Image (cartoon, helix red, strand yellow):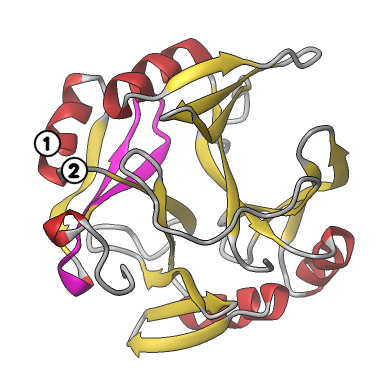
């Protein structure tokens, strides 16, 4: 399913601390995965794998902990070459990852980091996401129009402009995410980033809990389009993620 975000991985300097935080926040459980020379684990929500966590030291001040989205493509090698031609930086060249598939990691022209993946096991089917699972994705960037062109070229997205600085991108007839202008308070020179949103029963409660667990609120809870409550949070290492609460507890239309 080209364009669908099919996997999400946290790159963090402290795997044990991340497990404590996300376990307390969302009730996730964790299983260590033996990988040579790496500390790696998968997170489970209700017994289903919801994310992977990779421990990596950060020695470069320009590096930061990140939730990395993996976007499906039919040809990772072609996409990496095409992305470079469009101004992206190929951070990790195409490679085969046992148990996952063929991947490449890129930074788009404004610096947002993402992975392209051809899964070895096939892409998960579309469907409603339960509480505690990823439910939406948004790119925050100083150039939403340029992002629509860039990601549309790479993944074949249909981009629909909702208003100035806001696009919905779709593939296979399903909305995959939004391309948004930087939120108020972000400097115009801020590096772009992808944000993945986790479905929660209450955004306000999640925002209170994150501070108690050593994280912080990046953007306060507020109603977004379609009456969806959202907030941007950061874990104790600084990795940013979103939370969202559907009105009435169930999705009604496309979250934006």
Residue 11 found in image quarter: top right
Q: Is residue 24 above or below residue 85?
A: above
Label 2: few (<14), some or many (≥20) within 10 Å?
A: some
Residue hosting label 1: 205
Residue hosting label 2: 201
**Residue at image point 33% right, 59% down:** 187
Q: Tell me: 190 left or right of 242.
A: right
Mark toward the viewer: 1 or 2: 2
> Would you say residue 191 is visible in this rendering?
no
Distance from Cα at disc 1 to Cα at disc 2: 8 Å
Percent x, y of residue 12: 53, 25
Any magenta on residue 42?
no
Dot 1: what SS? helix
**Residue at image point 48% right, 59% down:** 192
Q: Is residue 35 above or below residue 152?
A: above
Query: Decide: marks 1, 2 in contact (CB < 8 A)?
Result: yes
Q: Tell me: 127 left or right of 106.
A: left
Quadrant that contains the C terminus: bottom left
Name the residue nearer the viewer: 76 or 165.
76
> Would you say residue 45 is visible in this rendering?
yes
Percent x, y of residue 165: 36, 81
**Residue at image point 40% right, 88% down:** 161
**Residue at image point 23% right, 63% down:** 184
Any magenta on residue 243?
yes
Q: Which residues are magenta?
A: 226-244
Name the residue nearer the viewer: 108 or 22.
22
Percent x, y of residue 41: 60, 20
Dot 2: what SS? loop
Q: Tell me: 5 left or right of 75.
A: left
Label 1: few (<14), some or many (≥20) within 10 Å?
A: few
């Amino acid at each position: 399913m080209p364009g669908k975000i099919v996997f999400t991985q946290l790159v963090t300097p402290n795997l044990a601390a991340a497990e404590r935080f996300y376990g307390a926040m969302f009730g996730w459980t964790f299983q260590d995965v033996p990988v040579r020379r790496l500390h790696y684990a998968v997170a489970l929500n209700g017994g289903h794998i919801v994310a992977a966590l990779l421990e990596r030291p950060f020695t470069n001040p320009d590096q930061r902990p990140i939730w990395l989205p993996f976007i499906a493509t039919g040809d990772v090698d072609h996409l990496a070459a095409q992305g470079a031609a469009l101004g992206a930086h190929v951070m990790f060249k195409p490679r085969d990852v046992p148990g996952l598939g063929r991947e490449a990691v890129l930074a788009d022209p404004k610096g947002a980091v993402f992975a392209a993946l051809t899964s070895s096991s096939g892409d998960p089917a579309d469907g409603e996401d339960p509480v505690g699972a990823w439910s939406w994705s948004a790119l925050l960037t100083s150039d939403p129009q340029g992002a629509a062109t860039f990601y549309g070229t790479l993944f074949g997205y249909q981009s629909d402009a909702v208003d100035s600085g806001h696009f919905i991108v779709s593939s296979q007839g399903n909305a995959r995410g939004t391309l948004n202008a930087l939120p108020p308070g972000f400097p115009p020179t801020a590096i772009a980033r992808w944000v993945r949103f986790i479905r929660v029963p209450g955004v306000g409660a999640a925002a209170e809990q994150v501070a108690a667990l050593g994280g912080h609120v990046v953007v306060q809870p507020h109603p977004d389009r379609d009456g969806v409550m959202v907030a941007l949070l950061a874990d104790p290492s600084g990795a940013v993620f979103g939370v969202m609460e559907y009105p009435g507890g169930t999705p009604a239309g496309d979250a934006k």
